[in-house]
Each structure stands twice: as structure tokens, then as C-alpha cells.
Image (spheres, rainbow, N blue to C red):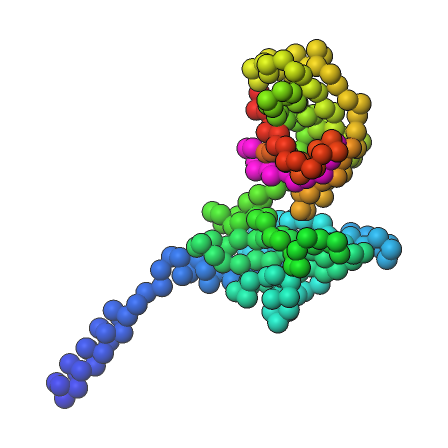
Amino acid sequence: MQNNFLLLLVCCLLMGCGPKETDLEAAKKAWSQVQLNCESLSDDEDLPRYAVYAMLQENKVKLAEVSACDTILPEAYADKGIPSTAITAVGGFWAGYEEYIYAIIEEEQLRLFIGGIGEEGDHDKPQYTPLANYDHDRFKLLRPLHPADLAGYYMHQGADTSYVLFLGLKGPNLVSKLFATADPMPAQKVLQRALPEFAASPDLDFNCNLNGLDFLSGLGNGHIYWQPDSASVTFHQFMGRDETVVFELMTY
């Protein structure tokens, strides 16, 4: 009888000393419940628009607006360039452009990505960029959702000619204006006051896809790289020339 009691006690101790769930394992288990939801913004069948929201526990954030939004099944991930380990994905194809958003746990984080590709794209699958992550029990967006987030002065210092690019709002849309000088560029803290002495273009259209941050403008086309505390406007084609010209956001 005593032996049976000792055996039972040993079993209980062994069970109590079994592996415990770490904080990271518990977090990953919670992150795996993330959802991507589509909410219609337009009743116009010829111009559909959906808001994509990420939801986890009590947290909800608007990630982007897209023209097609359906749940993407795991068996279709590979064809759309989505990692097989993604938790969930949404998106679709509309008017020659396909766009997708997915959530994944990687690098010990819950991360969300967005990617798109047009019929005339250089790649055979969408190319994805970070959209948001989940940090300290809340979603943190890594890109702007409103044109006003991109407004400001951007500077490029060249060997012969230096430029200042201004992005501003005209109604709900962005417009651009380019200032140029062959003289040495003044310090940033006094540069805006010096702009009236620069050669200046008229206001030009600046059409930016706020999801992918690619843009088409009267000056050329390219991509904006944006973070909450920094940004750069990278032209891949500038003033009719196929060259890369990078403008950095002025912080003064």
C-alpha cells in the first residue's frame, strides 16, 4: 500500500514538472487567431472598394483599401506569392490589377504584408512589403493611409543640380512642385526660406497608390518608402530620364 502511494506521488511530481508554455508560445497561440475582414465601401459595381481590417482580441485597425477582397484559400497561396505559413490572406483581381494582404508569424512577431501586380508588371507574382505588425498588444501601421501623411518637403542634392520636391494637398489629392538650383544647397533649417530664389515648376499631378506606395506624377514614376518618422521619394524615371533619383524627407 505504501509503495502504491509513493508511486502515485512520484507520478504527480513528474506531471507537475512537465514543460510549461513560455510567454512567446502563449503569444504565438494568441496571434494565430488574427482575422482579416473585408468591409464594402461602395455600392457601385463598376467601381468596387473595400476596407481591409485586421482584428485580434479587442484590437481592430484599418490596413488598406482595395478593389477586390475575398478570402484566399491556403492552396492558392503559392500562385499568389504568399508564404505557405501565412495564417490568413485576403484580396483579389480587378481591372487588370491584383492585390493581396496576408498575416504571418515570423521573426517572433505577428506581421502583415501587402503586395500587388498589374497585367504589365515586371514580375510573375506580387511583390510584398511590410504593412503592419502587432506590438505591445496593438497593431502598429508601417505605412500611411492618408495623402496628408506624405505631405512635406523632400530634398535631393546632386552633383550639378540640387532639388527640393514639395508634396502638398489640393483637395483630397496630392500635388507636387519641384524647386531646382545649381548653387550649393543651404542648410535644411533655412532651406524653405531660400526656395523663392530657386527655379520652380508649376503644380503637377502626383498620383500615389496608398496601399503599395507606387506613384505616377508629372515628374516621373517611382515608389515612396515611408515610416512614421522618416520617408523618401524614389523616382525610377525622373523628368523623362530612366534614372534613380532619391529625395529624402526634410525634418526641419
Residue 220, quarter of the rendered image: top right
The overriding secondary structure of the stretch rendered in magenta is: strand
Q: Nearer the viewer, residue 2 or 158?
A: 158
Quick check: 144 above or below 84?
above
Compared with 151, 198 (above or below) is above
Relative to 176, does residue 30 appear above or below in the rendering? below
Query: Magenta region: which residues?
Result: 219-230
Whether residue 250 is visible:
yes
Q: Could you tell me which quadrant the C terminus lies in?
A: top right
Q: Is residue 68 visible?
A: no
Is 61 inside the magenta-drawn segment?
no
Residue 227: image quadrant is top right
- Asked whether 172 or 164 is in front, the reply is 164
Q: Is residue 228 magenta?
A: yes
> Image point 25% across, 69% down: which residue?
17
**Residue drawn at (63%, 36%) of the image:** 244
* Residue in front for this viewpoint, 103 or 206: 206
Does 52 sit left or right of 12 as displayed? right
Q: Residue at x 79, y 25 (%)?
A: 203
Q: Measured from the top left, where is residue 154 in percent x and y?
A: 63, 26
Q: Quadrant of the N terminus?
A: bottom left
